[in-house]
Image (cartoon, rainbow, N blue to C red):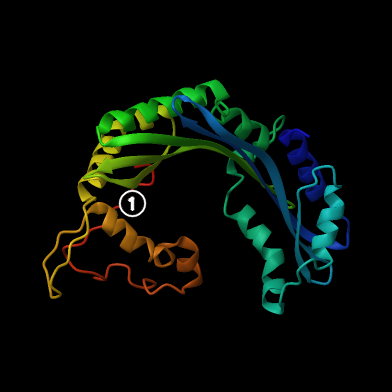
Amino acid sequence: MEQKTVIERYRSACAGLPSDIQAAEAEGRREKILSLTVTGGALAGSDSCDVTTVSVRAVGADGRGGFAYTQNLEEEPLAVIRQAADGGTLLDGAQAEKEPQLFAREEAAGIREEADGAEDSTQEERTAASLSSGALPSVADGIRIGAMVEQWALESSECITQASVTTSFYETENWTVNSTGLCRQSVHRWMDVAVSVVLQKDGALYNASWYGSFEDERQLLEQKDELTKSLRRSQAAKAVAVPFTSGVYRVLLSREAVYNILITLWQAFSGCHQQREDSFLCGKMGQKVASGLLSICDAPWA
């Protein structure tokens, strides 16, 4: 079933709720993934998926409500809404009191400002028309990109004897409709590139890797130098283990070492942990939390 049809079915159901349901909201997420692994310039493995999940929250006439989830797009939207309202997962008393107003607050916040006064079109139709065009690349294009990156890796060092590139292309479509008239839709596309190499140095074999996430192929092309530099740094870091005397040493950490340290703190930086206020960084805005020698900048596409 087409996403436009799914959205319209849930929009209509939310707009015409029966008297025993106070409010309802449906959120849909469609995720399309094409993953291709290239070795030796040829396709060595592939995987793909196209899954849509709809989550519904609703409040019944008694002020109690809950949540329901489905991946069956043929299921009647009103049946899913009723399942949520009947307490698929019951809200506690405090949540139940806030839930009916939650939808109204979103409406009052002006999310549908563009739709006010519209006569012949819905916000969904106007939003959908403004979405960027495009889709997942063809398998042939995916193989071409993987082979190109593999060649970059092999040319970065004579020590690299083998390379493998897995390129994953994503397209996520999110939409939200509710009983206050909200109808919102967005599409996001990006690609992940993971490179694995085997390098030989001083008679020993080592594994090295590189990973990047990009909005499109143009951004990937801009990162060619970063890929080769990273693999060369990995090669330089490989050395036969030698004994040394224990003690205190002044060291300069590589970016890979810093990354491995910071990745253990990912929960502290996670947005959801900030919202739940269970991160040690909560309430520290504007305060010094680390050495002045440390600076961190957010660059999600770098």
Above or below: residue 77 compared with residue 63 = above
User: What is the secondary structure assignment of the residue under circle 1?
Assistant: loop
Q: In the displayed image of the protein, which residue is found farthest to the bottom?
A: 93
In the displayed image of the protein, which residue is found farthest to the front? 203
Q: Quadrant of residue 34?
A: top right
Residue 277 vertical position relative to residue 75 in the rendered view, above or below: below
Would residue 176 be found to the left or right of residue 71 on screen?
left
Residue 239 visible within the image: yes
Number of numbered discs overlaid on the protein picture: 1
Snapshot quadrant of residue 12? top right
Give the answer, above or below, for where 156 lies relative to 236: above
Residue 180 visible in the picture: no
* Other residues around mark 1 within 10 Å, as few (<14) / some (14–19) / many (≥20): few
The amino acid type found where label 1 is placed reads: Asp
Q: Image check: 8 left or right of 34?
A: right
Image check: 107 left or right of 291?
right
Q: Which residue is drawn at 34% across and 42% down?
A: 302
Query: What percent of the width, then of the height, locates residue 24?
Result: 75, 57
Instruction: Tell me which residue sits at (79%, 66%) in the image.
Output: 88
Near-viewer residue (33 or 246): 246
Q: Nearer the viewer, residue 221 or 204?
A: 204
Residue 10: horizontal and vertical position, in percent? 78, 45
Q: Which residue is drawn at 48% across and 37% down?
A: 166
Q: Which one is in front, 202 or 44?
A: 202
Lateral position of residue 187 relative to residue 26, left or right: left
Q: Which of 84 and 209 is in front in this view?
A: 209
Q: Residue at x 86, y 47 (%)?
A: 76
Give the residue at mark 1: 298
Q: Which percent across, then down, holds residue 259?
A: 31, 56
Residue 285 drawn at (x, y percent): 32, 68
Q: In which quarter of the image is the N terminus?
A: top right
